[in-house]
Image: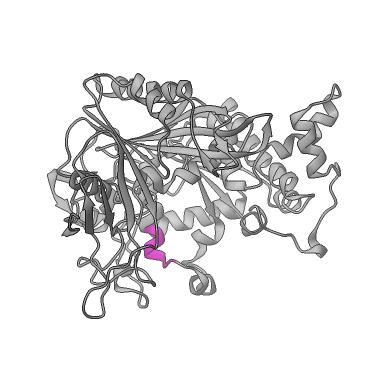
Amino acid sequence: MKQWRVVHIEEPELVFAHGQTAAHPKDGLFLYGPPSVNLNPKRMEVGVIATEEGLRLYQFWVKSINGTIASPDKGKEANKYMWPGFEAAFNASWPEQPYGYCRVDADEIATAIRTGMPHERIFKTVDIYEKALRKHLREEEASPRVWFAIVPEDVYKYGRPQSVVPKDERIASPIGIKKAAALRLIKQPTMFEEFNDEAKPFEYEANFHNQLKARLLDTKQVIQVVRETTLEILRDPDLRRRSLQDPASVAWNLGSTSFYKSSGTPWRLANVREGVCYVGLVFKKLEASRGKDNACCGAQMFLNTGEGIVFKGAVGPWYSESNKSFKLDRDQAANLMSMIVEGYKDMHGRYPKELFIHGKIEFGDDEWEGFTSTVPTETNLVGVQIKRQQEIKLFRFGQNPVLRGTAILVDDNSAYLWTAGYTPRLETYPGREVPNPLTVKIRRGSAKIEIVLEDLMALTKLNYNSAGFSDGLPVTLRFADLVGEILTAGPDGGRSWLPFRHYI
């Protein structure tokens, strides 16, 4: 029996301005700024969809992040970072006056978010924001790079799937159709359009964030949903006490994602191999499925530069109730992979040298045959299964948990990798429980397991949605569920492909 080996994968470095490197995004941005990329904005062109109060909060918040914000007095040392100011961190100005403004009415929102069943009230509330933006796109010339959809706290409280409006605040539905009847109409529409229209809200997910993004994908506008209370924490001490994040952390995280969504590159991976492409598979079961077509598929492609593209696949019978898992047939796997490799070629003028597919479950024989049928011969295709588990624990002497980057090599094709653990740069473990590893198995193709683990560690540092040190999952899988939810949040699901920034 081959003996298991314990190794340590070094912490990946990130590249910033002037080719300088650092392990922590905040260190690199604080000291050097983002890497020099042609698409990096010099001025933030941010549009705002908000109530009058939301606009005031936005302007106050932008003014605050143009200056310094002190690090928090309390909390973990890992989070005690001061904010140096937006231009100091990202080498771009952020004017207080928005590049475009779509006013929405606070009273209209308060009524809509309390009217009828969850699907109906969320559909009506999204309508308000969607119509305001589409009106702007028809009538105005200003084209912001990213839109802040700023929502009152009522939308956050009552605009989620499990949220409940208090009885004394509920407003009776003018439609009155029940969910079961609506789903029947969606599957088998009648010849009377007015009845079909009543069922329309039930074609969309009862989640304000996901539905708003899904319904605006066709506009190719990048949306950042922000709560009014997130922007208000500097002004209201009570909100600051309740907030999970301090004002400096909000500035780091919201500043980073806004820069990225404005086509900027906050940081890049250092020491990467040329011509490598990483793909995460996306599946989502449909709530209102028609016949055997019960799920949507897609893929997220990430490059070593940090660029990300989401490809939308077809709706089909991909979900098996007996196995509780998703599998593509040969034709759809081939179509999806064709979009990926051709998309890569369009961006780089050549096919990738290596293409790693990351999935949470094993790849089926027909599925893999479909993938390989459209990959050019010069591309090494590798299928890697990655999942969290609790079947093994690793402890070290002393009070600190296992080091981040520790790996147990089981054999040439499988390993356990701790992407969470004690992190020397942070001088702490940013977690509460004994960290669990990822189970990593090369299921198809050929690659060195050590290289696969190094890549996974690097991909935990490409979450531009925050400026945190790292994630527990590689970016190929970190947002898979969210992307799937947006792809299936409406009946259309948007364009065949769009940059990743449209989905997070």
Magenta span covers which residues?
A: 245-251
* Magenta span includes 318: no
Q: Residue 153 at what x, y percent from top left?
A: 62, 59
Q: Residue furthest bottom?
A: 398
Of residue 35 and residue 454, the one placed in the foreground of this image is 454
Q: Is residue 107 visible?
A: yes
Quadrant where the C terminus sits is top left
What type of secondary structure mainly makes up the magenta span? helix
Q: Residue at x 66, y 39 (%)?
A: 204
Q: Residue at x 45, y 43 (%)?
A: 480
Residue 187 vertical position relative to residue 481 in the rendered view, above or below: above
Residue 313 in the figure: left or right of residue 395: right
Residue 58 vertical position relative to residue 277 in the rendered view, above or below: below
What is the image's colouring?
one colour
Q: Residue 371 at what x, y percent from top left?
A: 37, 26
Residue 474 in the figure: left or right of residue 201: left
> So how many labels did they put on this image?
0
Q: Residue at x 79, y 26 (%)?
A: 189
Of residue 89 and residue 402, the one placed in the foreground of this image is 402
* Magenta span includes 250: yes
Q: Residue 243 at what x, y percent from top left?
A: 49, 68
Q: Is residue 34 visible?
A: no
Residue 290 in the figure: left or right of residue 494: right
Of residue 192 and residue 445, the one placed in the foreground of this image is 445
Of residue 373 and residue 463, the one placed in the foreground of this image is 373
Residue 252 vertical position relative to residue 271 in the rendered view, above or below: below
Quadrant where the N terminus sits is bottom left
Q: Residue 140 at what x, y percent from top left?
A: 55, 28
Q: Residue furthest front?
A: 1
